[in-house]
Amino acid sequence: MAVTLLRAYGGTPAGQVVEYTAELEAALVAQGLATAGGTITTGAQTQNTWSGTASVAIGAASVVITNSNIVANTKVWAVVAQAAADATALRVERIVPGAGLVTIYVTAAATAATSVDWAIITPPSLSTPAQ
């Protein structure tokens, strides 16, 4: 399942469709912070946030996230984020940041849309572009 955030939560701005555990999604809906449902876009996308959820499309082994907060040496963390992961895209294999984007690779071409949670981890000594 997925929820649409009505208010910012956990660094993700309002209006984003995100996937969390069923318990957390139910709590967000119960508190009026989100509505049930929504569709996470598969494939390349633009998310100018510090964290989010992307979805590797069927037949693809990676997803590109365009993000103005990312430079070539930005540290990004990512993990496959669904209870019943795709049979082939089992985990994140490699993360390659670049100027204004990050490419997240999974172990093999996905046989079903595969959700990936990601977050920018920026050490204090690393400067990022002005916003």
Image (cartoon, grey):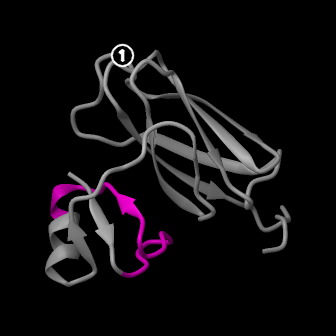
Q: Position of residue 68 (x, y in %)?
A: 74, 59
| Amino acid type of the residue that numbered disc 1 sits on in the rendered structure | Thr
Q: Position of residue 66 (x, y in %)?
A: 67, 49
- Magenta part of the chain: 7-23
Quadrant assignment, res 63: top right
Q: Position of residue 31 (x, y in %)?
A: 19, 84
Q: Tell me the chief SS of the magenta region.
A: loop
Quadrant assignment, res 3: bottom left
Q: Residues within 10 Å of mark 1 (few under 14, many from 20)?
A: some
Q: Position of residue 13 (x, y in %)?
A: 48, 73
Verify whether residue 98 appears in magenta.
Answer: no
Q: Is residue 119 left or right of residue 16?
A: right
Q: Is residue 42 left or right of residue 70?
A: left
Q: Nearer the viewer, residue 46 or 20?
A: 46
Q: Nearer the viewer, residue 59 or 52?
A: 59
Q: Residue at x 71, y 46 (%)?
A: 101
Q: Is residue 74 left or right of residue 127?
A: left
**Disc 1: which residue:** 88
The C terminus sits in image quarter: bottom right
Q: Residue at x 43, y 79 (%)?
A: 8
